[in-house]
Image (spheres, rainbow, N blue to C red):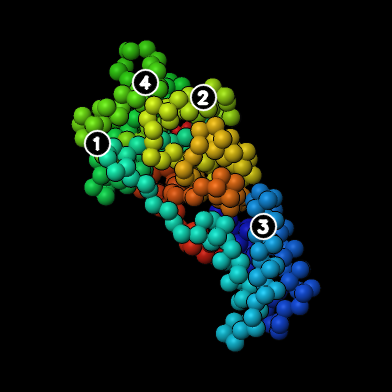
């Protein structure tokens, strides 16, 4: 992941080694190359523009430092700007004062929502929570089954419509699941919702209806990091159609160029909260902007 971006940036920094004070021309040339590297990594244009503006401004204003040579100074500035672009501090889950906390998962089909439900369930259980997974994706015939398998692996109960009750109404299932959670004393309800292959008005309306009846404490938008720049349009659609409070980046183990990861926070205005890095339930962690920036810089 991010390999080509890492290589490009390290090449740019190498060229600065051995230079004395950076001239205006050096700063411009470096900024231009960083801009190209980000664009090649499929980072959204407005994000690239702001990034470059900040880098230039800070490089020009940088004090001549005894401790850092110009190359190190630029690396430090780029690192800090990467951290800021990725969200700065990590953001923790918002828990309801009065349980159950409701976490709704939204995103396109194949983004990794069902897998995430299991990962999040397992992770919460390890922290002594008592999660409940809810099968409100009734669009795909196999989705309920898939969630049940994931729930079993995670050791987390799954609330699903009774088999034989027809297709069922996902909004009703979601609503009933909250009552069920209260009855059986589950403190976090994780609702898996239906996605489509592309943005779809009906899917968005259903997600909004589920949001309305469950009043979630978090709406986590799950996005496949591999889709790069397309992430922007999808993220905007979910932000406007459902309203999201946080982002989960999935498939960070693939060879994503970095575009989605580096664009999504600024585009949605919401923090990246978790990272999914594989198909196994343990391939999951809180998202740390600082660590990700360090990884990008190699
Ligand atoms: P959903 O349609 O949004 O519920 O997506 P799924 O959870 O069914 O995931 C779609 C596919 O991506 C499945 O084959 C998952 O095993 C796979 N998947 C999910 N998360 C990850 C991840 O972080 N890394 C990798 N490599 N595969 C993942």
- Which residue in the protein does label 1 denote? 186
| Residue 92 horizontal/vertical position (percent) | 39, 52
> Spatial distance from mark 4 to mark 3, Cα to Cα?
44 Å
Q: Is mark 3 within 8 Å of ligand 1?
A: no
Q: For mark 4, give the secondary structure.
A: helix
> Where is 37 relative to 120, above or below?
below
> Where is 117 relative to 10, above or below?
above
Q: Is residue 42 visible?
A: no
Q: Write the residue at 49% across / 39% down.
A: 244
> Spatial distance from mark 1 to mark 2, Cα to Cα?
27 Å
Q: Quadrant of the C terminus?
A: bottom right
Image disc number at residue 236: none
> Where is 213 relative to 118, above or below?
above
Q: Write the residue at 27% across / 40% down.
A: 98
- Which residue in the protein does label 2 denote? 205
Q: Residue furthest left?
A: 184
> Spatial distance from mark 4 to mark 2, Cα to Cα?
14 Å
- Which residue in the protein does label 3 denote? 50
Q: Residues within 10 Å of mark 3 (few under 14, many from 20)?
A: few
| Residue 214 horizontal/vertical position (percent) | 37, 30
In this picture, residue 238 sits left or right of residue 215: right
Badge 4 vs badge 2, beta-carbon distance below 8 Å: no
Q: Residues within 10 Å of mark 1 (few under 14, many from 20)?
A: some
Identify the mark nearer the N-term, 1 or 4: 4
Q: Nearer the viewer, residue 21 or 146?
A: 21
Identify the mark nearer the N-term, 1 or 2: 1
Identify the mark nearer the N-term, 3 or 1: 3
- Which residue in the protein does label 4 denote? 172
């Amino acid at each position: 992941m991010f390999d080509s971006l890492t290589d490009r940036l390290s090449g740019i920094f190498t060229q600065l080694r051995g230079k004395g004070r950076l001239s205006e021309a050096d700063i411009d040339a470096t900024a231009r190359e960083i801009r190209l590297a980000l664009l090649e990594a499929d980072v959204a244009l407005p994000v690239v523009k702001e990034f470059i503006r900040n880098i230039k401004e800070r490089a020009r204003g940088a004090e001549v430092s005894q401790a850092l040579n110009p190359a190190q100074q630029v690396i430090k500035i780029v690192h800090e700007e990467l951290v800021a672009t990725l969200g700065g501090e990590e953001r923790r889950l918002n828990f309801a004062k009065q349980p159950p906390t409701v976490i709704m998962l939204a995103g396109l089909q194949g983004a990794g929502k069902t897998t995430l439900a299991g990962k999040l369930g397992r992770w919460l259980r390890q922290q002594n929570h008592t999660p409940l997974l809810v099968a409100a994706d009734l669009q795909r015939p196999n989705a309920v089954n898939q969630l049940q398998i994931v729930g079993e692996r995670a050791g987390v109960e799954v609330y699903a419509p009774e088999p034989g009750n027809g297709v069922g109404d996902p909004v009703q299932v979601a609503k009933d699941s909250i009552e069920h959670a209260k009855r059986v004393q589950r403190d976090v309800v994780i609702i898996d919702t239906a996605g489509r292959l592309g943005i779809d008005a009906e899917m968005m309306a259903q997600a909004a209806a589920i949001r309305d009846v469950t009043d979630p404490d978090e709406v986590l938008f799950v996005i496949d990091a591999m889709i790069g720049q397309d992430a922007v349009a999808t993220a905007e659609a979910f932000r406007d159609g459902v309203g999201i409070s946080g982002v989960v980046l999935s498939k960070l183990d693939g060879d994503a160029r970095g575009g989605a990861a580096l664009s999504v926070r600024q585009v949605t205005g919401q923090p990246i909260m978790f990272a999914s890095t594989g198909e196994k339930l343990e391939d999951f962690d809180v998202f740390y902007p600082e660590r990700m920036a360090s990884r990008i810089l190699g």
